[in-house]
Structure formats: structure tokens, C-alpha cells
Amino acid sequence: MLELLTIKNKTHAVILINNSLTNVNKYINQYILSIIGKNIDLNKYRDLIWFDNTSEGVKKQDIENIIATFSYSAKEAFNKRFYVIKNIEHVNIQSLNSLLKFLEEPHDNIYAIFTCNNISNVLPTIKSRCQTYPIPKLYGIEKNYNPVELSVYNDYDMLIKDDTSGLFKELSEFVNKLLANNKIGQIKALSEQFKKMDYYDIAIVIKIVFYFKKKEVLLKMLDTLYLNPNKILLFNQILNSLN
């Protein structure tokens, strides 16, 4: 991944091979910022189109909208435009055919970023037009968390010590809101935020909650994260552990 970030002339299309414990969104953001060349707030970047490709999927019309949008000049002064499609292996064939035509004729300063969990499931014609990069697993669940061998308190201290990105602070604030709020509207908003988290983030959330609540069910939840459990179910289990 470091190779990908340090390459001077970035390719027009990449596939990032994900794993269930990787914070893939932050890798994507890091890659985009390496192209832009400046640390900016990507949430406000008008030349970035992002599809998580979850329940509704990516439709052919979505691809056509990307092409139409990028047929105009860039909105940002950086003149760098990006479109992200996660789980590219699950996109339907009609949408991929439309995308293929766009990939076959690369445009200056337009970058495609795809992710997948299994590169062998990606349509070969898409794969052949992209550079592929496996994302290394971040430290976390499988590397340094074993409920029997590792003190959760020390693990919590380690997260504080190693927090150079601000991730731990961000997730701590989420947990504090979770602990403080019991109104239905507020809980719903937190639930929506939780659904957008990667399993890496969720592991840290569970560890922080455990620090305050010391419920054994939280340890069991950590042990199941590699199975990619339903996030709403996880959120509800965390809520129940607060009582």
C-alpha cells in the first residue's frame, strides 16, 4: 500500500483488495489525498462520487451519471476527479459493461477507485484495465486482541497511545454520545453512523464500551467480527450491554 501512495504518476484505475478487518475507507481517503497533494476535507470535495454498493447496489444509471458528471469541467481548483465503487465484484453485468466503456478510454485527472473482497470474483475485463493492490491488515482484532491473553485495559491504553490519526478520539466521542443519549431520534442517528463504520472501527468501539461496562458479551462480539456480522444486530447488542 505504501507503494501505491508514493507512486508519482498514479494510474487512472485501481482495485484495492480488502479484507474484513481493514479500515478500507481510510485507505481510500489516504490514496485520494496523495493524488490531490493536500490534506483537505473530502466530505466537502465536490469532485468525488462514492458508492458503497450495499443493499441497493450500483445501477447502470449510476454509471451513466458518473460519465455525464465528469464530462464537464472539474468543480474544484485541484482539477482532480474521483469515483469510488466499493465491492466491485457485486456490481451487476449491465452496470459493468457501461463502466467498461468509460475505463477503456481514460481521461486526464479522472481516477477510478474500486474495492473487492475477492479479486477472483471481479469481472476479468474490469480487472485487466486496473492496477490491483492488496490492502494489508491493520493492527487490531486478529493481531493483538485475545480476551484470554490480553488485558482489555492495556489494550485501551494502547489505542490512546497509538492514536496519531484522530480515529480513537472520533470513536470515543461516538461512544460518549451512545452512553449519554437514550432518545429514539438520537439513537437512530448513532445507528446510521455505526452502519457506515468498518469492522476495524467497530472493534475499537466495542473495546471502548467494554472499558466502561465490562460485559462479557462484548468480548464474544469481538470474537465474531471476522465473520462480518450484521451491523444493526451488533449495534443493538451494544445498546443492550449498556443497561
Image (tube, rainbow, N blue to C red):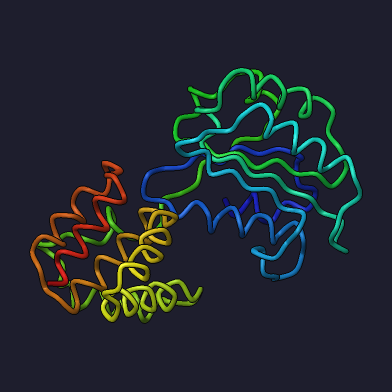
Residue extending furthest right? 73
* Image quadrant assignment for residue 117: top left
Residue at the image position 67 percent from the left and 63 percent from the top: 42
Find residue 23 and report its horizontal and vertical position in percent: 45, 55
Q: Quadrant of the C terminus?
A: bottom left
Left or right of 102? Residue 40 is left
Of 72 and 12, the residue lying toward us? 72
Find residue 108 and report its horizontal and vertical position in percent: 88, 43
Find residue 72 and report its horizontal and vertical position in percent: 90, 45
Residue at the image position 8 percent from the left and 64 percent from the top: 216
Residue at the image position 29 percent from the left and 45 percent from the top: 230
Residue at the image position 28 percent from the left and 56 percent from the top: 141
Left or right of 81? Residue 123 is left
Find residue 126 and report its horizontal and vertical position in percent: 65, 24
Left or right of 151? Residue 230 is right
* Image quadrant assignment for residue 238: bottom left
